[in-house]
Image (cartoon, rainbow, N blue to C red):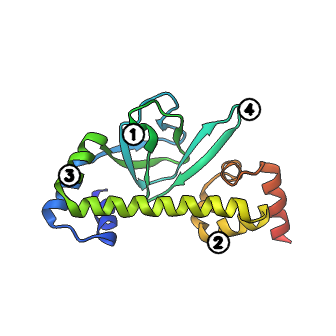
């Protein structure tokens, strides 16, 4: 399991063996069952999670009672509630496994120490956070500039792994659709 994280880090930066080992020693493995939560609304988020195996969704409950998916994560992705983790406040999100999963988790305290000790590992996490921010910006732009059908097709084109793994109601929520609207789009695509 540590091999996944090791390989991921080496795709972005070239730390010394000592620096890489500091990161690997700082993480703990956790097995998460389908529908189990990493965190629920109201809890304090204490960890950053690297997904070794599985799929997660991050969502909140709208005032209407509807679940609103804001993110997904699959293998080789990091997931957490950054607001809760960074500001030490109760989470407004739920992070739930959409499949049986395995994660490596690192506490905020260990991460902070590691980022101070290693410029290279700090650089790795900065690069990961930049990728996340860029993806979020693109998603927001696409949601405002594309039609629903264009948004769905763009998502499918850029994220084919998710389309096959994520239940349609979750995908509809992520794209800002009703499940019925997504069904209509998918039906037109099959014709």
Q: State the CA–CA distance, disc 3 to disc 4.
A: 43 Å
Name the mark nearer the viewer: 2 or 3.
3
Report whether 176 appears left or right of 33.
Answer: right
Q: Quadrant of the C terminus?
A: bottom right
CB atoms of marks 3 and 4 within 8 Å = no
Kind of element beneath mark 2: helix
Which mark is on residue 101? none
Q: Could you tell whether 46 is left or right of 43 in the image?
A: left
Instruction: Kindly indicate whether the residue at mark 3 contacts the one at mark 1 (C-beta within 8 angstroms).
Output: no
Which quadrant of the rendered structure holds the N terminus?
Answer: bottom left
Q: Residue at horizontal 50%, vertical 27%?
A: 42
In front of the other: label 3 or label 4?
Answer: 3
How many numbered circles are shown?
4
Q: Position of residue 127 (x, y in %)?
A: 37, 64
Nearer the N terminus, badge 2 or badge 4? 4
The reply to whether the C-beta atoms of the residues labelled 4 and 1 are less than 8 Å apart is no
Q: CA distance from mark 2 to mark 3?
A: 39 Å
Residue labelled with disc 2: 157
Observer-side mark, 2 or 1, equals 1
Q: Height in image: 130 above or below 86?
A: below
Residue at the spot of label 1: 85
- How far, Cα to Cα, is label 2 from label 1? 32 Å
Mark in front: 2 vs 4: 4
Q: Is residue 76 at least partly visible in the picture?
A: no
Give the mark nearest the N terminus, 2 or 3.
3
């Amino acid at each position: 399991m540590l091999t996944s994280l090791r390989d991921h880090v080496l795709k972005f930066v070239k730390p010394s063996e000592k620096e890489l080992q500091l990161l690997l020693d700082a993480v703990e493995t956790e097995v998460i069952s389908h529908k189990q939560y990493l965190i629920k609304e109201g809890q304090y988020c204490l960890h950053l999670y690297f997904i070794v195996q599985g799929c997660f969704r991050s969502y909140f409950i709208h005032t209407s009672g509807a679940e609103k998916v804001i993110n997904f994560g699959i293998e080789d992705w990091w997931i957490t509630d950054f607001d809760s983790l960074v500001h030490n406040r109760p989470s407004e999100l739920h992070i739930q496994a959409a499949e049986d999963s395995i994660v490596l988790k690192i506490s905020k305290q260990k991460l902070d120490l590691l980022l101070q000790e290693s410029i290279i590992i700090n650089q790795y996490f900065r690069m990961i956070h930049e990728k996340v921010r860029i993806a979020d910006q693109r998603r927001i732009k696409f949601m405002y500039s594309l039609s629903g059908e264009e948004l769905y097709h763009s998502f499918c084109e850029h994220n084919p792994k998710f389309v096959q793994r994520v239940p349609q109601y979750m995908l509809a929520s992520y794209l800002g659709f009703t499940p019925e609207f997504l069904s209509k789009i998918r039906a037109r695509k099959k014709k």
